[in-house]
Image (tube, rainbow, N blue to C red):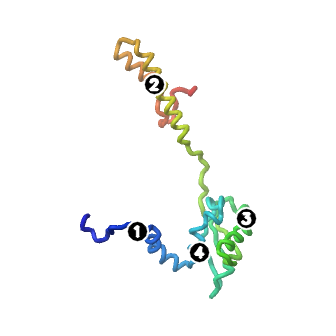
Amino acid sequence: MANDQTRKKHMTRLSKLVDLMIEPSARARGFVFSQLISQWQQIAGDMASWCQPVELKFNKSETNNGILKLAIASGRGPEANQQAEHIISRINATFGYAAVSKLSFIQSLQAKPLQPEPLEAEQRDSQAQLNQSIWTLDEKLQKVRSPALRTALRRLGTPCDDRGGSNRYPDE
């Protein structure tokens, strides 16, 4: 590893490394489309979660008034049609000229299921409550003289891990 000729003694910007990888694709697809993909989150805003650019076509020898094909999630067609003019104006404002004049939609994206993600604060609070209940249980079990009985009672009094799907204590 010390004699590895590919390693450099100084840091290199990530953009220089990434540009080398992206350049062939950007050259084949064109500058406008590569810029559109890289700035799509800012252009589309909330729509970017269910709408992505797929293809940008121009007439021969033109680089304006193109047709942008967007992949959208199933069921979002009416909303996409309603937002079409807004998207076109945002794209053209980003590039500073009329790069896109029409949108076409294909419903090919998978809709992401709505699942609330567990919050870290709630997890920390529940862990703190669990730790407190274990300490309280240990204090109560100090009076039990038999070590075997104390161990069995502690095991019975400790809440189960919920990963199995059933909760041993329904009122928690």
Marks 2,3: beta carbons within 8 A: no
Residue tagged by mark 1?
12
Residue tagged by mark 2?
134
Q: As shown in the figure, which amino acid type bears the numbered disc 3?
A: Gln
Q: Residue at x 32, y 67 (%)?
A: 9
Give the Cα separation between the discs numbered 2 and 3: 55 Å
Nearer the camera: disc 2 or disc 3: 2
- Of residues 98 and 69, the one nearer the viewer is 98
Q: Position of residue 154 (x, y in %)?
A: 42, 21
Give the Cα separation between the discs numbered 1 and 3: 41 Å
Rendered image: mark on residue 83? 3
Instruction: Give the quadrant of residue 156.
Output: top left
Query: Counting residues from the N terminus, which is met first, the one under dot 1 or under dot 2?
Result: 1
**Dot 3 surroundings within 10 Å: few (below 14), some, or many (20 or more)?**
few
Give the Cα separation between the discs numbered 1 and 2: 52 Å
Q: As shown in the figure, which amino acid type bears the numbered disc 4?
A: Phe
Secondary structure found at label 2 = helix
Residue tagged by mark 4?
33
Query: Counting residues from the N terminus, which is met first, the one under dot 4 or under dot 1?
Result: 1
- The quarter in which the C terminus is drawn is top right
Q: Position of residue 111 (x, y in %)?
A: 61, 56
Secondary structure found at label 3 = helix
Is residue 87 depicted above or below 30 in this figure? above
Q: As shown in the figure, which amino acid type bears the numbered disc 1?
A: Thr
